[in-house]
Amino acid sequence: MLKQLLKQHDGPLTRDLVQEPGTFGLGKIPSRLKPHSTVSSICGFCATGCQLKIHLDESGNAINLSPHPGYPVNLGMACPKGWQALDPLDASDRATTPLLRDASGKLSPVAWDTALDAFVSRLKSIKETHGHESVAFLSTGQIPFEEMAFLGCLFKFGMGFLHCDANTRQCMATAVTAYKQSFGFDAPPATYADFEESDVIVLIGSNLCIAHPILWQRVMRNKRTPQIIVIDPRATETAQAATQHIAMRPKGDLPLLYALAHCIIRDERTDAQSISNTSGFEEFSEFVKSHTPQAAAEATGLSPEAIEALAATVSQPGKRVSWWWTMGVNQSYEGVRTAQAIINLCLITGNIGKPGTGPSSVTGQCNAMGSRLFSNTTSLVGGHDFADPAHREKVASALGISPDLIPSQTSLAYDQIFDAIENGKIKALWIIATNPFHSWIDRARLDRLREKLDFLVVQDMYHSTESARAADLVLPAAGWGEKDGCLINSERRIGTIKAVRKAPGIALSDFRIFRLIAARWGCGEMFSGWTDPQAVFKILRDLTVDRPCDISGIRDYAHLDAEGGIQWPFPESQISNLKSQTPSERRLFEDGKFFTPDRKARLHFATPSPIPEPTDSEYPFTLLTGRGTSSQWHTLSRTGKSKLLSLLAPPSAYVEIHPDDAAALNLKNNGTLTIRSRRGEIQATAYIAPTVQRGQIFLPMHYPEVNLLTHPSFDPHSRQPNYKACAVALWVR
Ligand SMILES: Nc1nc2c(c(=O)[nH]1)N[C@H]1C(S)=C(S)[C@@H](COP(=O)(O)OP(=O)(O)OC[C@H]3O[C@@H](n4cnc5c(=O)[nH]c(N)nc54)[C@H](O)[C@@H]3O)O[C@H]1N2
Ligand SMILES: Nc1nc2c(c(=O)[nH]1)N[C@H]1C(S)=C(S)[C@@H](COP(=O)(O)OP(=O)(O)OC[C@H]3O[C@@H](n4cnc5c(=O)[nH]c(N)nc54)[C@H](O)[C@@H]3O)O[C@H]1N2
Ligand code: SF4
Ligand SMILES: [Mo]
């Protein structure tokens, strides 16, 4: 196989396989490929946060890479995306120059000067005519937090706008809201060592093998012969590798989790000490009384006996139980209460704040956690609250600006920004490092809304994305590997990324673009100290003092590199209390104290509600969506450019369908299936396998057709889209 691949891809593949001189037995390495020096950098794809060693030539240009054996996250491992992380930089569709739509409607190359003029003059005139709520941005969890903070502060404090959100709304908003309400702060408690120290690992709505392959490797290192339970309607790669698969009905999670709490409380398998650190236990016990396993059978499709058995497994006295969830939970119309039902189980059984325990959301994008703390979109930069006058004072004084520049009002959420475009309130949109014209739920609505926008700016590495093609102005951005900054991974570990390549053409880092915009807008003075990413890192670090995410003990980037990344919190005041100067693994809530005013965790719960778009006789199938393979990233703008990664994934949309359903439709393997929802109709190649249950199909999100079908419903608390269940009809033409 390897030989075959090498034949097909002599150039780049040979280069990328030559990671460590001599290790692959590929013979003598040409001198142009011999590394001159090496730097470390965190991978820019998923939130696992693996560290890579990037090998450089004499001029500091990356020639290849290898996973870092000494980093506490990946321990020398990387998944295919990490190994091929340099490939997307060389793509021929990189945005190398700004593009502006000309009088004939064509996007034409222009100089930065012209692009900045257009940007500033259009947005200023829209602001003058329609007010400060008429311009919005949509950004990302995939750029360093120094850049994110710059964007959020520039937009709100410098340019004086209000409405902005990020693709973290599509992804982590549910977990954020759940933690904030339950713990008083957005504080994921676990550390990756917990994967290795659990007796029972429950993965709920998470396909770890595909979406976080290196975290699955951490599970495999567990020496306690753990029970690994996967709760997912699909028999995913992870479910197949687990010790037990709970193949429940889509969105049966909440009734299931309440039934588990019912059994555990009924049988007194609770932990009194842990419960004393919570509020609301009496009410919760009363609430779950009616949530018997029998009552949950219909919604979950599970037998009462199976639910009783699961309750016993996750509450075994003396056993360490850890719960991990991802998009199967977050992307639900009742995701917040579902995440909190998981949190409640951990709290009442004492599975929190100890090795091998915890309710943990596994985050998605490389800097989802950094955006949560520093983006200045939903919460005020540095883990603060826009609504709190003391927080506004503190941030204003630290940034040397007037508190009046900090709005007390919160921004509209992603879907509300689109509603505001629809009703004419928002006239211009600036999209940075995300591709909503592919990834947003019911995305055809965006194509319709495009006409309503007076000005659309897209800032991306590529000019070819669905979003860039729709823009009036494309700003060419450097990508991972072409700039410096910090990312925060799922276990709260902060690590650095490095510039190891020059950006193509006249593309600039997002950081430089924000500096240019600040100067041209006339607010450059406000950001005079924001000279480079490390200077901003220090400003942000100092802002976190006295917040739960206090990182005042981190000196600089070199400190982060020397310690193998550092998890927050890391307050200067407490460094001397830490057992070792910088322990490589730390979890939260070891003292049973939370960030709420009374230091107790709150048990939140609510009666489960019906699926927003249930199946019926016209649309009898449930459509599930999610990640397809470990070599595909989201809208494929990056991984689609790697020859090797492309070889590892189907080139066009495919659909998983159960053999009995396929037989009933007279559908052959690799045949074409037409899929229709109330929003649109698409075609996909059939992959017939009992990985999905009867009555369900699965489409990977990587193909642009998929979100033509999805149903725009949202969690009322987090406003996260309900991507994972809608009703569709199928036929073979
Ligand atoms: N290779 C690769 N890795 C990635 C990404 C990528 O694009 N490609 N993206 C990254 C990002 S941003 C994210 S957010 C993560 C996502 O990581 P995951 O959440 O693990 O991935 P998904 O496939 O979106 O969804 C997980 C599972 O939820 C299941 N599911 C659907 N409905 C339900 C339900 O009602 N209940 C339960 N319990 N499960 C349900 C689906 O069948 C699916 O197997 O992956 C990250 N890692
Ligand atoms: N049906 C369905 N839809 C889904 C999901 C699902 O499970 N099902 N999952 C949702 C989830 S969890 C997520 S996170 C979203 C992801 O959705 P998106 O964020 O839209 O997907 P990406 O392809 O990661 O888009 C990132 C864009 O940023 C560009 N880019 C990369 N690096 C940089 C940089 O440094 N600077 C700039 N300026 N640009 C850069 C890339 O070229 C790319 O165009 O999709 C969501 N959509
Ligand atoms: S698991 Fe995630 S962070 Fe690690 S190499 Fe793969 S994509 Fe990169
Ligand atoms: Mo995500």
Image (cartoon, rainbow, N blue to C red):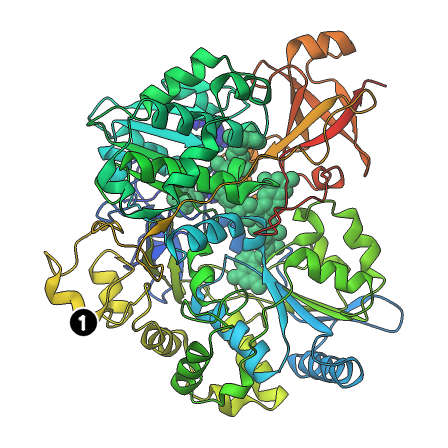
- 36 displayed left or right of 520: left
- Whether 79 is drawn above or below 718: the answer is above
- 143 displayed left or right of 355: right
Residue 78 visible in the displayed image: no
- Whether 704 is drawn above or below 671: the answer is below
Work out whether residue 650 or residue 711 is closer to the camera in this orientation and state it.
711
Q: Secondary structure at mark 1?
A: helix
Instruction: Please tell me which residue is depicted at 57% across the width and 84% down the height of the picture.
Output: 158
Instruction: Give the image quarter of residue 425.
Output: bottom right
- 478 displayed left or right of 75: right
- Whether 117 is drawn above or below 249: the answer is below
Residue 554 screen position, x and y as percent: 25, 69
Instruction: Please tell me which residue is depicted at 68% across the width and 14% down the height of the picture.
Output: 669
Work out whether residue 619 or residue 207 is closer to the camera in this orientation and state it.
619
- Whether 143 is drawn above or below 293: the answer is below
Instruction: Give the image quarter of residue 703.
Output: top right
| Label 1 near ligand 3 (CB < 8 Å) | no
Q: Residues within 10 Å of mark 1 (few under 14, many from 20)?
A: few
Residue 311 screen position, x and y as percent: 37, 22
Q: Which residue in the structure is indicated by mark 1?
A: 573
